[in-house]
Image (spheres, rainbow, N blue to C red):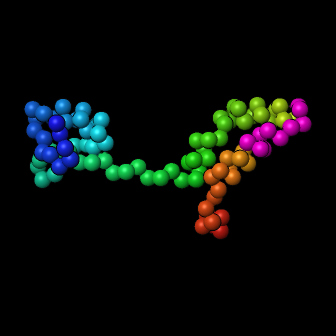
C-alpha cells in the first residue's frame, strides 16, 4: 500500500503512520511535503549495555552474596565473572 519515498497527504496520513509503525519507517516533512522515510538502524549495544542486560537484578545479586556467605559458596562471583567473560571490555577501553 505504501513505500519508502512516497509522498503522503492528509487523506492517507493516518494509514501511512500505521504502515510506518509496522515497517520500520516514519513520516518526515521535507521541502513542505510529508514523505515516508526508512528508520535509521539501531546502533549495536556496547559491551556495558550487554552486560547490564544480562546481570541479575541487584536484589538477586544481594541474595546470592548473602547465601554465598552462609554456605561458603561463590555463586555471585561466578555469575558476574561469566557475564564479564561473555562480554569482555574492548582493549581500547582497558587502556584508559
Quadrant location of the N terminus in the rendered image? top left
Residue name at image x 77 percent, y 40 percent: 76
| 77 within the magenta span | yes
Q: Is residue 54 left or right of residue 20?
A: right
Q: Which one is in front, 92 or 96?
A: 92
Quadrant assignment, res 93 = bottom right
Q: Main secondary structure of the magenta part?
A: helix
Determine if residue 37 is in view: yes
Q: Given the current orientation, which residue lies at the most extreme front position?
A: 1
Residue name at image x 31 percent, y 47 percent: 39
Q: Position of residue 32 (x, y in %)?
A: 11, 49
Q: Position of residue 9 (x, y in %)?
A: 10, 38
| 46 within the magenta span | no
Q: Is residue 47 left or right of residue 77?
A: left
Determine if residue 29 is in view: no
Residue span colored magenta: 70-79
Q: Position of residue 8 (x, y in %)?
A: 13, 41
Quadrant location of the C terminus in the rendered image? bottom right
Amino acid at each position: 500500500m505504501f513505500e519508502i519515498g512516497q509522498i503522503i497527504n492528509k487523506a492517507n496520513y493516518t494509514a501511512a503512520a500505521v504502515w510506518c509503525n509496522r515497517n520500520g519507517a516514519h513520516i518526515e516533512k521535507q521541502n513542505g511535503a510529508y514523505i515516508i522515510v526508512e528508520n535509521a538502524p539501531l546502533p549495536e549495544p556496547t559491551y556495558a549495555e550487554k552486560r547490564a542486560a544480562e546481570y541479575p537484578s541487584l536484589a538477586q545479586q544481594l541474595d546470592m552474596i548473602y547465601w554465598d556467605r552462609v554456605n561458603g559458596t561463590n555463586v555471585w562471583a561466578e555469575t558476574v565473572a561469566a557475564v564479564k567473560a561473555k562480554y569482555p571490555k574492548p582493549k581500547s577501553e582497558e587502556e584508559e
